[in-house]
Amino acid sequence: MEIVILVSLLSLYCDFTDAECLVVSPARLVVKHGDPASSNCSSDTPVEMGWEATQGGVGLTDKKVKILRWKVDSVTDWDNNPKCFTDGGQCQKLLDITVYKLPDRVSISYRKYPDPMVEGHRYLLQCLVQNIAPIGRLRVTFVKVNTTGEQTELDTPQKSKDNIKTPENGTYTLDFTPGRDDDGAQLLCSAMLDLGPEGPQPPPVMNSNRLNINVHYKPQITMSPGCFSMSITEGDTLSLNCSANGNPAPSYDWLLPQADPNPMEERSVVTITNIAKSHSGEYTCIARNPLGKSTCTVNVEVKDAECLVVSPARLVVKHGDPASSNCSSDTPVEMGWEATQGGTGLKNKKVKILRWKVDSVTDWDNNPKCFTEGGQCQKQLDITVYKLPDRVSISYRKYPDPMVEGHRYLLQCLVQNIAPIGRLRVTFVKVSTTGEQTELDTPQKSKDNIKTPENGTYTLDFTPGRDDDGAQLLCSAMLDLGPEGPQPPPVMNSNRLNINVHYKPQITMSPGCFSMSITEGDTLSLNCSANGNPAPSYDWLLPQADPNPMEERSVVTITNIAKSHSGEYTCIAINPLGKSTCTVNVEVKVDYLPIIAGLAAAAVVILLVVSCFTYSSYYKHRRMGHYQLKDMLPRRHNNKHVVQHNGMDQSVM
């Protein structure tokens, strides 16, 4: 009875499983054909065992052993399946062995040889892998190698699913459609024998020969200045270059305007010096080769030559700085400068160049103009006078202290006394606590063509989040005056606004808002930390069985937890903007292992006591008998002679 109780108690925590009768180590071998191989077969207890194999077989041993080796000096059998067995075949274990052989040759070819290939046509590539085993572990990849040596995998045909162990030939194909960029590249195929982690690492790879790719394609014109309209000044030189990519190399024809004396030109470049108005019209280039042609047309407009040239043609000048520009003519003429500052009037003698010069530009709307006698020819100087702002400032339209997460606030950037305001670019910027700057928005530039200094006001709707607390806001004013202006464009930043964002709490609780279990007697600790501004206060709703159903602290700790503490623990984080709750369902489990161990120990003690008592009683009553000292002497009783024999009373008549 006691043994049954003990076994029942122990079976609650113990599972009994039979160990393997035989163990083969290594259990899997990958061996190159002709190489040696070995594996051990072992048993926990000595047994009669043997190896059954077409190579390296060992008969059943005469005596019991714990280990027996299978060994072959040169593996030549492709389908060897060594098996370790015990007497009577009650237990047996198979050795997983893979015998491999690298290919004799890997080659790539076309199914039908194309010389040359043609762009856009499809060709069948063929990869032959000769005399490889096992072919089921072969992975073939087609590869393209470009002219710079860069390799691109084109395709990897699926592995053969045949379970053939002896050497075989494998043929793999790929449809290949070349493009013009493939001209001059090479093709190859790569054969990799992937034998798993027990095989050679990295897996052996053999590459094929390389096929050179010669691709023919029709011309494609890459023309300068391009297939569009252009203008040129009379007397200048026109040069049109009709270069084209094509294989074979293309020939060129030009169709020129009908008024040209040579309406057809057979060359890639057309050059016309001292061009005249009569050369205006369409210039069409035709590039041809046997695969096709490509055309490109440029519409050329020849304009009258300028009588005057102003250089530089555009000036960007800071208010108060000096400025100058030259007016020139190919032939001497009487010319002058008309301007509110720096005007010269018409010169009495003919000149080829006349300078406009001002020591300090103060007129915001000066438009200097160079002219000839009688006003037959005139040229205006494009001048921009600029001034940097006196001040840039940022503010709220209505000051919020503090801001509240999710509310919208109107920011205002004031740029004071800047010119020209039409070239001003204002950007609102947020600077994080780590110093990282983020552009929030760039209001559109003012389209006013005002040249005098002005004040500019720019606004932005800003909706802060909790991550913005502690950051700063500013606005940046950049005066972008184009390539003729100062480089880089001048920038002035505003003051900075500190952001104080209030937001409701958000609990970041450990271990989280979910169920958990804990063993009776352990310590429970729940930390209800929360992010919030202002800093939140904390309340806890504890299970009803707890003596303190409400706790006002962020951390709840219960030492030596009991089953009665099971239930829901709800944390509430509160500040003036709201609250956040998190509930953890705690299940307190009883650890039965100490109880079972105690019962098992008690059962063992009881069993020992009962066994000792039972044995003692049996030995005393059944084997030892009863002894008395007086019974050791002979005596008579009622005329009977009583003799003590072996401690037992016997009567003799």
Image (cartoon, rainbow, N blue to C red):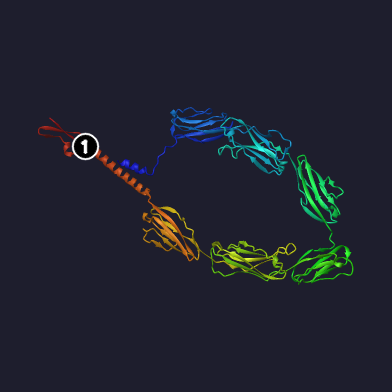
Q: Residue furthest right?
A: 349
Could one spot residue 249 in this view of the protein?
Answer: no
The quarter of the displayed image where residue 191 is located: top right
Along the viewing direction, whichever of 463 and 498 lies nearer the viewer: 463
Q: Quadrant of the C terminus?
A: top left
Secondary-structure class at tag 1: loop
As drawn, is 21 to the left or to the right of 375? Answer: left
As drawn, is 310 to the left or to the right of 645? Answer: right
Q: Residue furthest front?
A: 258
As drawn, is 475 to the left or to the right of 544? Answer: right
Q: Position of residue 19 (x, y in %)?
A: 43, 37
Q: Is residue 218 above or below residue 503?
A: above
Q: Position of residue 60 (x, y in %)?
A: 47, 28
Q: Quadrant of the N terminus?
A: top left
Q: How many marks?
A: 1
Q: Amino acid at mark 1?
A: Gly
Which residue: 74% across, 37% down? Answer: 116
Q: Residues within 10 Å of mark 1 (few under 14, many from 20)?
A: few
Along the viewing direction, whichever of 379 and 609 lies nearer the viewer: 379
Could one spot residue 412 in this view of the protein?
Answer: yes
Q: Which residue is mark 1?
A: 625
The quarter of the displayed image where residue 249 is located: top right
Q: Position of residue 2 (x, y in %)?
A: 30, 42
Q: Position of residue 595 (x, y in %)?
A: 35, 48
Along the viewing direction, whichever of 169 and 464 lies nearer the viewer: 464
Along the viewing direction, whichever of 437 and 274 lies nearer the viewer: 274
Which residue: 59% across, 34% down? Answer: 160
The quarter of the displayed image where residue 114 is located: top right
